[in-house]
Amino acid sequence: MNHVHPAAGERASQAVARYSEADVPTEYGPFRVVVYREADSGDEHCAFVRGDVDGAEAVLARVHSECFTGEVLHSLKCDCREQLDQALRRVATAGRGVVVYLRQEGRGIGLGNKIRAYALQQQGVDTVDANLRLGFEADARRYHAAVAILRDLGVKSVELMTNNPAKVEGLRAEGMAVSGRRPMVIDPNDHNREYLETKNERMGHLIDL
């Protein structure tokens, strides 16, 4: 597989610094895993890269936020694991693309507060109001690190895999050109249907249920 060009690192934004990289075999095939450290927080984010994306336009891409409960515990309360799996498979099939994995659990409020929000949801509160009751924004995620990573990789513009128009605008606001949006296909279950409906009705997501 093609490696990320070393010269791309010279274009890195001060928001992140490239720390390490290696080829990793996965069930989707080999990916180049590039780890970055955020300058302000020290948080580590990473990019899963397939093919040569340096200088490329309309690169198939997903900007994905960490979800320990969904991805590790296989919780049925959300669709995060399914979206990550779908994105990696699409990139593997296309032969070129990037999945940026951001360490911003629980829409940016952290794992502990996410579980506190879950406790409120057990009382009948939806995901938006749960975050608000805990004193957070409905969605506290930020995308400056993702754009810095994409720039470091040499990506000129992306075809973004997302159901969230706000994510498209978030990347554009940070200076990344988004040439198109590819919807993620989600099959709801009995545990996450209300969560997905809340995404649609209160957060402006475009999910076909």
Image (cartoon, helix red, strand yellow):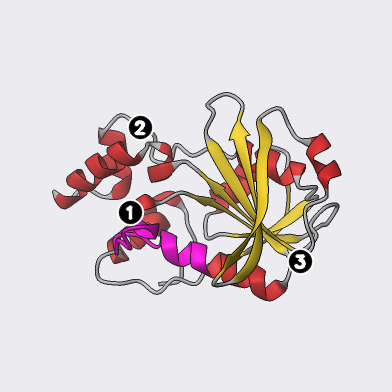
In the rendered image, is residue 193 in sight? yes
The answer to which of marks 3 and 2 sits earlier in the sequence is: 3
Tell me the residue that label 2 is attached to.
Answer: 136
How far apart marks 1 and 3 lie (CA) works out to: 32 Å
Q: In the structure shown, which secondary structural element does the residue marked by tag 3 occupy?
A: loop
The answer to which of marks 1 and 3 sits earlier in the sequence is: 3
Magenta stretch encompasses residue 72: yes
Q: Mark 3: few, some, or many residues within 10 Å (few <14, many ≥20)? A: few
Q: Are marks 2 and 1 in contact (CB under 8 Å)?
A: no
Q: Which disc is residue 135 wearing?
A: none
Magenta stretch encompasses residue 114: no
Image quadrant assignment for residue 90: bottom right
Image quadrant assignment for residue 181: bottom right
Tell me the residue that label 3 is attached to.
Answer: 1
Q: Are marks 1 and 3 in contact (CB under 8 Å)?
A: no
Q: Is residue 13 above or below residue 22?
A: above
Residue in the image at 50% along x and 72% along y: 185
Q: Nearer the viewer, mark 2 or mark 1?
A: 1
Residue in the image at 30% along x and 42% along y: 114
Q: In the structure shown, which secondary structural element does the residue marked by tag 2 occupy?
A: loop
- In-front residue for pair 96/118: 96
Q: Mark 1: few, some, or many residues within 10 Å (few <14, many ≥20)? A: some
Residue 152 point in image, percent of width and height: 75, 42
Q: Nearer the viewer, mark 3 or mark 2?
A: 3
Q: Mark 2: few, some, or many residues within 10 Å (few <14, many ≥20)? A: some
Image quadrant holding the N terminus, namely bottom right
Q: Is residue 102 left or right of residue 108?
A: right
The answer to which of marks 2 and 1 sits earlier in the sequence is: 1
> What's under tag 2, amino acid-wise?
Phe
Q: Which disc is residue 69 wearing?
A: 1
